[in-house]
Image (cartoon, grey):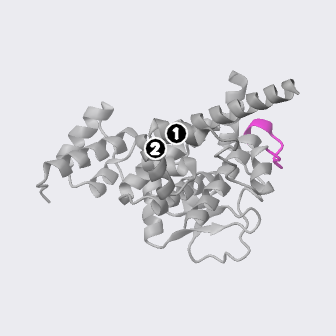
């Protein structure tokens, strides 16, 4: 029993750390350049405004959850396949780079749809 | 036009410096700031340490439609449209920020940027003029740069169906050369 509790505690700790790292990074990006941060984070201007205003105590409080506060920004196999380079082009390095660009274009386009 | 506000002038100089650092041609600076030609020329020499390139700007939309340039242009324009929709930016600031994101992304993939900031600026102007637009590919859903009045119902992008000779030109040689260096 105790080992389960211990590993669970470890898991929660890691979730808190990931949450906190994400929030701190997001806040840093928003303060450095808000427009570019919106693109990188894929969040709306309102959410970015809220994250920007959070105090360190609030950050800690939000991070201390049993859920991750960030999730995948794409949920279709199109983007997944492109990112994992299921590319038809045979030449490896060039093919992978092109598939990466393809994924970027598809993702950037989807983001525009979401926030429009 | 004379600039009255010093704050506004300073903002314009900052903008001009950002553009020069990204490699913009003098025509872009002349069009996007109210600074005089002489001041821009001095600023250019100060920032780049050399005189700006002479000659006309590329004016054709066709470059954006060829295979590799189309991929690069589409990536940039998607980024630009995203920034344009989510933030209230002046057009030129949007172009600068989107171009910076484009450079980052291209370098992260280990590629050479094909799209210059001058061409990126031209591209946005072509979109403003209604000459080119973004069209969704019916296979991947990604949006790509096309001429505005093309038949786009069953448009398939150059990445879903690359042309027969795609990637067999000079750029391919470049990629291979880089590989052999490592």
Q: Nearer the viewer, residue A110 or B135?
A: A110
Name the subunit of mark 2.
A
SS class of the residue under badge 1?
Answer: helix
Please state, as top left, top right, bottom left or bottom right, where the C terminus of chain B lies in the image: top right
Q: Are marks 2 and 1 on the same chain?
A: yes
Q: Nearer the viewer, residue B42 or B165?
A: B42
Looking at the picture, how far across and down is residue B136, in whole percent?
A: 66, 67
For residue B156, side relative to residue A18 (left or right): right
Please state, as top left, top right, bottom left or bottom right, where the N terminus of chain B lies in the image: bottom left
Residue at position x 29%, y 45% in the image:
B16
Q: Which residues are magenta?
A: A85-94
Any part of residue A47 in sight: yes
Q: Residues within 10 Å of mark 1 (few under 14, many from 20)?
A: some
Residue at position x 61%, y 55% in the image:
A108
Q: Is residue A10 above or below residue B160?
A: above
Looking at the picture, how far across and down is residue B166, in whole percent?
A: 73, 51
Name the subunit of mark 1.
A
For residue B18, side relative to residue B58 (left or right): left
Q: Is residue B94 above or below residue A25?
A: below
Check residue B133 for magenta coloring: no
Marks 2 and 1 sit apart, C-alpha to C-alpha, by 6 Å
For residue A72, side relative to residue A49 (left or right): right
Residue at position x 72%, y 32% in the image:
B176
Looking at the picture, how far across and down is residue A44, in whole percent?
A: 52, 57
Q: Would you name the residue on which mark 1 appears?
A: A59
- Rendered image: mark on residue B4: none
Q: Nearer the viewer, residue B153 or A9?
A: A9
Looking at the picture, how far across and down is residue B12, in whole percent?
A: 25, 49
Instruction: Tell me whether circle 2 and circle 1 mark residues in contact (CB < 8 Å).
Output: yes
Q: Would you name the residue on which mark 2 appears?
A: A54
Q: Looking at the rendering, which quadrant does residue A16 occupy?
A: top right
Q: Is residue B19 above or below residue A9?
A: below
């Amino acid at each position: 029993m105790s080992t389960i509790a211990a590993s669970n505690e470890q898991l929660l700790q890691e979730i808190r750390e990931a949450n906190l790292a994400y929030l701190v990074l997001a806040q840093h990006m928003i303060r450095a350049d808000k427009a570019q941060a919106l693109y990188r984070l894929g969040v709306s201007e309102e959410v970015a405004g809220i994250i920007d205003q959070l105090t360190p105590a609030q950050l800690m409080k939000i991070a201390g959850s049993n859920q991750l506060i960030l999730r995948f920004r794409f949920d279709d196999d199109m983007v997944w396949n492109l990112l994992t380079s299921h590319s038809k082009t045979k030449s490896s390095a060039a093919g992978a780079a092109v598939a990466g660009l393809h994924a970027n274009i598809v993702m950037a386009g989807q983001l525009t749809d979401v926030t429009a | 036009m004379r600039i009255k506000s010093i704050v506004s002038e300073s903002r314009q100089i900052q903008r001009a410096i950002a553009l020069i650092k990204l490699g913009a041609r003098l025509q872009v600076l002349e069009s996007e700031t109210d600074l005089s030609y002489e001041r821009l020329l001095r600023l250019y020499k100060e920032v780049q340490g050399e005189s700006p390139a002479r000659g006309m700007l590329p004016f054709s939309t066709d470059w954006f439609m060829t295979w590799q340039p189309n991929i690069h242009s589409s990536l940039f324009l998607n980024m630009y449209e995203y920034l344009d929709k989510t933030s209230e930016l002046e057009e030129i600031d949007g172009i600068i920020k989107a171009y910076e994101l484009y450079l980052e992304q291209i370098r992260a993939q280990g590629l050479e940027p094909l799209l210059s900031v001058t061409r990126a600026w031209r591209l946005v102007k072509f979109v403003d003029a209604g000459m080119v637009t973004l069209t969704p590919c019916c296979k991947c859903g990604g949006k790509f740069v096309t001429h505005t009045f093309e038949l786009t119902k069953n448009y398939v992008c150059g990445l879903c169906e690359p042309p027969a000779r795609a990637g067999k030109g000079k750029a391919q040689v470049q990629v291979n050369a880089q590989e052999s260096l490592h």
